Amino acid sequence: MIELQQLCRSFQIGDQCVHALDHIDLKIESGAYLSVMGPSGSGKSTLLNMLGLLDTPSSGEYLLNQTATSPLSEEPRATLRREHIGFVFQSYHLIPRLTARENIELPLILAGMPPKQRRPLLDKVMTRLALSDRAAHAPKQLSGGQRQRVAIGRAIVMKPQLLLADEPTGNLDSTSGREVIELLEELNDEGITLLVVTHDQNIGERARRELKMIDGRIASDSAGNAVATRTDV
Amino acid sequence: MPSLPVPTSEPMRSADLIAFNLKLIERQRLRSAMLLAAIAISVMAINLLTGIGEGGKQFVLAEFNLLGKNVLIMLPGKRETTGGIPPLTGETTRDLTLRDAEAIARLGNVSAVAPLIAGKMEISHDKLSREAFTIGSNRAFFDIRQLDVAQGKALPQLPLEQSQAVCVIGSKLRKELFGTKPALGQWLRAADSRFRVIGILKDKGQGLGFDMNEAIIVPVASAQALFNQAGLFRVFIELRSLDGLQKSQQRILALLKERHEGKEDVTIITQDSLLWAFENILNTLTLAVAGIAGISMLVAGLLIMNVSLIAVSQRTPEIGLLKALGCPARTVALIFLSEASIMALSGALLGILMSELLLYLARELYPTIPFTTPLWAQLGSALIATVTALLFAAIPARKAANMAPVDALLDKKAGQA
Ligand SMILES: Nc1ncnc2c1ncn2[C@@H]1O[C@H](COP(=O)(O)OP(=O)(O)OP(=O)(O)O)[C@@H](O)[C@H]1O
Ligand SMILES: [Mg+2]
């Protein structure tokens, strides 16, 4: 489903060049469950943003379902994000003036879906995430765990194939953190490809495949063969 | 494994766009109120000033339509008529006399002449008394000014020099002096003279600044005695046809020059010259309107731009989120532009309502002047406000639309840690 080929992303800071991603080769199958760990500044978020089409590579290629994404302009990339990729962030990124339900509804609205079609989809997600009785609450009236559940609801309402979570439990206590991870794993069981960036060893070990990053490179991959297939295109 | 065809993207529905923006506007009440006020004031300025200008123009047009195109007004004294409104009052170099009026009446193209003396006088009947606008004129005055009598008759046909103790009064004056009692045949007193009421005018609005409903009209010779003044205030001259207007005007001037020892010391006003002069004033007014409106629009526009720029940087993470959710650049731009248009349109509506209210009050205060803003000015001002808002919001909207998704989301400037 996903294939990175010799992908680099570097940032120019003054006259210094930081290689946040340094010749990455990576293949991810549909339905996989990966965790990405590594020290701060090792390039985990940069990798996630790259996979989410939020960022563009400095060199190399990113194939999404055999389609090269680097020739695409922002417009089709936005459409790909909308239709196929869901994001969950550490700091939730909810819009404070919208209610929980409206936050989840936002992707459907941006996709131009008529209200009649939105309602059943929304109702399903709200029930699925046990948020129905919080529908009319503003984000600031919700607990951290509830906010992250709203963010997850927003990420999956468009039924994406790929769910990218950047430290989704980073702001949560261990109980609600575990609840969130369990929710993400349930979604993965239903077929969604899941990639979780985390600092938490316990959470990282739950994944079927673990990546460890150091200095913009994948230092270890529990499915070692993924790195070996770099030469065939 | 399903492949990923790039689906065609539907634009955001306008109802959703409006709802989204309204929540934003509601959330930033103070900011929105300020913007709304700036737009409303500039739109109000346009509508108010156009309404006043248009009202004034209609007022003058109505006045002169009453008079008729073929009527000339002659006043004593020579004035430059180029630029500015011709003087309606002023000091006299040499009196216009009844004999002058008679001489004019004998000219070929002149069908009627009405001399005029006017002033305020204390008029009384029994114990009631009123200061009334007193006009000395003749029978022709009634035809030229299109005055109809409701009861009795108009002034009789008399030689100009002959006085007679009769008068015709306006309906309001009749009511004030006689109440419900009959007025016809009764005597009124003005200074040392007495006049018998022979006619009562039909209700009629103001004319050239006098309210005919409050007026009393007596023969011109009687008024001369009453005011102890020989010189005429004006002479209305009605021409047989419009064809020779220019030539007749010159012949009248030549005649007066000859009669006044070679001095051209009268001014003739035509409907055209007055309208033209008024047009001049209107044009100046229009320029002032354009200036004021332009400045206030500019202020509103700059305010919109400033506020939108601040909003773009405050809402950068939100813009990033929208992009992460797959919102295309033009939808991001549309969100900002539509917010500006919503503000502009509601501001314009508010401004139009405010100007309508003020013009309504003006009509209540001055019922004779038809203060109304024409539809084109209302639509035009709303259009100008919207275009200004869009122009000034375009820069921030572009800025927001062109942000790289990841930078916006993390709220970092590109190339910076
Ligand atoms: N927009 C940017 N501009 C400049 N440098 C950047 C930018 N984004 C990331 N970097 C740099 O790239 C490197 C990798 O950053 P990244 O955010 O991917 O690290 P991370 O592994 O997510 O770290 P953390 O665990 O702290 O979140 C860092 O050295 C960082 O300073
Ligand atoms: Mg990170």
Image (tube, rainbow, N blue to C red):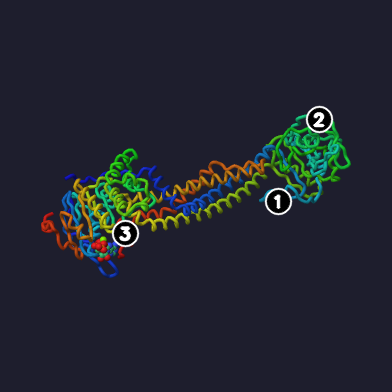
* Label number found at residue B410: 3
Q: Nearer the viewer, residue B171 or A171?
A: A171
Q: Quadrant of ligand 1?
A: bottom left
Q: From the viewer's perspective, is the residue at label 2 or at label 3 nearer?
A: 3
Cα separation, mark 2 vs mark 3, equals 92 Å
- Dots 1 and 2 on the same chain: yes
Secondary structure under the numbered disc 3 in the rendered image = helix
Q: Nearer the viewer, residue B333 or B143?
A: B333
Give yes or no for contact between labels 3 and 1 (Cβ–Cβ under 8 Å): no
Ligand 1 closer than 8 Å to label 3 CB: yes
Q: Nearer the viewer, residue A176 or B127?
A: A176
> Can residue B162 be seen here?
no
B83 versus A199 height, above or below? above
* Label number found at residue B80: 1
Q: At x 83% / y 33%, what residue is drawn?
A: B197
Q: Position of residue B50 (x, y in %)?
A: 58, 46
Query: Looking at numbered disc 3 in the image, what kind of residue is underneath it?
Result: Leu
Instruction: Please report whichever mark, 3 or 1, sits nearer to the chain's N-terminal start.
Output: 1
Q: Position of residue B147 (x, y in %)?
A: 74, 34
Q: What subunit carries mark 1? A: B
